[in-house]
Amino acid sequence: MKRVAVFASGSGSNAENIVRYFMDKPNIEVSIILTNNPNAFVLDRAKSLNIPSLVFNRADFSKTDKIVDVLIEKKIDLIVLAGFLLLLPPRLIDAFPNKIVNIHPALLPKFGGKGMYGMNVHNAVVENKEKESGITIHMVNEKFDDGKIVFQAKCVVEESDTAEDVAEKIHKLEYEHFPKIVEQLL
Ligand code: GAR
C-alpha cells in the first residue's frame, strides 16, 4: 500500500479530487489531510470523505517535529500540496527528500513566488494580457514555486476571459492531470 498525505489551506477541491481518484485503486490511499487553517472547507470535505484530518498551527509546523512525526508514523510515501499556502520548513523537506509535490495554477517560472496563489495568479495573468496560462506540477524545495518541474499543461486565455474564467479552465486541467501525476510519482 502506498500512502499519500495532502496539505491544503482552503477549499480543497483538488484534495477531494485526489481522494476520489484513489478510492477505487486498492494499492494507493490518501491517509490524511492536513491544514494550517481551522476554517478551511477542506476539513468538511475530509469529514464527508471519511479521511482523517489534522489542523496545526504555524509554530508547531515550522519549529517542532510534530507534523514530521505524524507523517513518519503514518508511513507516508508522498506529500501532496494542493492549494497549501505556507512555505515548508527545512525539517519537513529534509525528512521527505524528493517526496513532496506541489501544484501551481500558472506556467512557472511565470507568475510564481510569494503572494502568487489562487485568484492572485489569475488576476495577474489577465492584467498582463497573457494569451495562455496553465498548470505546473513540481517537486518542492525551500523556496516558493522553485523545485524541479515534472509536468505542465496549457490552456488558451481569450481576450474576453475574466480571472474567474481562467480559474475555471485551470481547475479543469488540475482535476484531469494532478491525480495521474501523483500516481506516476508513486
Ligand atoms: C489551486 O488552483 C492550486 O493550483 C492553487 O490553489 C488552488 C486551490 O484550489 N495553488 C496555489 O496557488 C499555490 N501557489 P482548491 O483548494 O480548490 O484545490
Image (tube, rainbow, N blue to C red):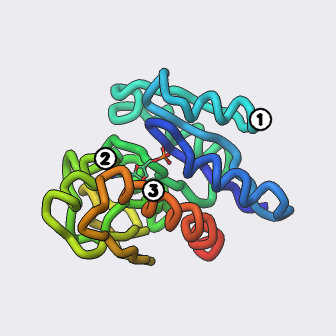
Q: Check disc 2 and report the residue beneath it.
A: 119
Which three-letter amino acid code belongs to the residue tagged 2? Met
Check the picture and name the quadrant holding the N terminus: bottom right
Q: CA distance from mark 3 to mark 1?
A: 27 Å
- The front one of 74 and 169 is 169
Mark 2 CB within 8 Å of ligand 1? no
Q: CA distance from mark 2 to mark 3?
A: 11 Å
Q: Check disc 3 and report the residue beneath it.
A: 168
Mark closer to the chain start, 2 or 3: 2
Considering the numbered disc 3 on the image, is that residue within a helix, a strand or a loop? helix
Mark 3 CB within 8 Å of ligand 1? no
Considering the numbered disc 1 on the image, is that residue within a helix, a strand or a loop? loop
Which three-letter amino acid code belongs to the residue tagged 3? Glu
- The front one of 182 and 121 is 121
Label 1 environment density (alpha carbons within 10 Å; few <14, some 14–19, many ≥20):
few
Of all residues, the one furthest to the front in this rendering is 160
Residue 104 - label: none
Q: Is residue 16 found left or right of 124 in the rendered image?
A: right
Residue 50 - label: 1
